[in-house]
Image: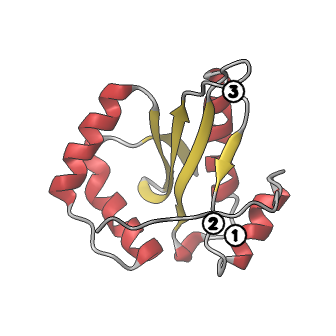
Amino acid sequence: MVTIRHIQEKELPALGRLYEELMDIHTNVDQMRQVFKSAESSGNYHLIGAFYEGELAGSLLGIVCLDFIGACKPFMVIENVIVSDRIRRQGIGKKLMDEIEKIARENGCGYIILVSGEQRKEAHVFYEQLGYRDEKVEGFRKHLY
């Protein structure tokens, strides 16, 4: 049984472990708590978790961004999509993506953006199956640390 819901502060250590699986980088859970509180208070951050047999097994972050062009409809950015290696291919990623799309629609978002590392070919197939298109744009990142 899989339950999809917003992650609570007490579940941040488990989320940190998932992120280590995703990025192979240790997450400072104390700092994560501070960021979590700030994100929660804004109302525009949606940290969604997939709980498999009561354990956090997947997550994503959806951020509602305001826009100042055209009809000025907000849009959503999706980041940090992860389903644990041990339970992939059971529909959990799709359930996470369906939930965040529902939230985007509830917030009046005109579109959703997500980026994925070039090497994550399997993830790209998954996103395309969900209706996301490769629109041939270039992504750029400048690290400030």
Q: Amino acid at mark 3?
A: Arg
- SS of the residue under disc 2: loop
**Residue 79's x, y, as percent?**
53, 54
Q: Is residue 22 above or below residue 54?
A: below
Q: Are marks 3 and 1 in contact (CB under 8 Å)?
A: no
For the point 73% across and 78% down, the residue is 121
Q: CA distance from mark 3 to mark 1?
A: 23 Å
**Residue 6's x, y, as percent?**
44, 38
Q: CA distance from mark 2 to mark 3?
A: 22 Å
Using a 10 Å C-alpha cutoff, classify the residue at mark 2 as few (fewer than 14 neighbours), some (14 to 19) or many (20 or more).
some
For the point 66% across and 76% down, the residue is 118
For the point 27% across and 73% down, the residue is 26
Residue 6: mark: none
User: Tag 3 or tag 2, which sits nearer the N-term?
Assistant: 3
Residue placed furthest toward the top: 71
Using a 10 Å C-alpha cutoff, classify the residue at mark 1 as few (fewer than 14 neighbours), some (14 to 19) or many (20 or more).
some
Q: Is residue 142 above or below residue 10?
A: below
Front disc: 1 or 2: 2
User: Tag 2 or tag 1, which sits nearer the N-term?
Assistant: 2
Residue on which the image places disc 2: 116
Residue on which the image places disc 1: 123
Q: Amino acid at mark 1?
A: Ala
For the point 61% across and 72% down, the residue is 117
- SS of the residue under disc 3: helix
Decide which of 98, 132 is in the foreground and name it: 132
Q: Are marks 1 and 2 in contact (CB under 8 Å)?
A: yes
Q: Amino acid at mark 2?
A: Ser
Using a 10 Å C-alpha cutoff, classify the residue at mark 3 as few (fewer than 14 neighbours), some (14 to 19) or many (20 or more).
some
- The colour scheme applied to this rendered structure is secondary structure
Decide which of 11, 41 is in the foreground and name it: 41
Residue on which the image places disc 3: 105
User: Tag 1 or tag 3, which sits nearer the N-term?
Assistant: 3
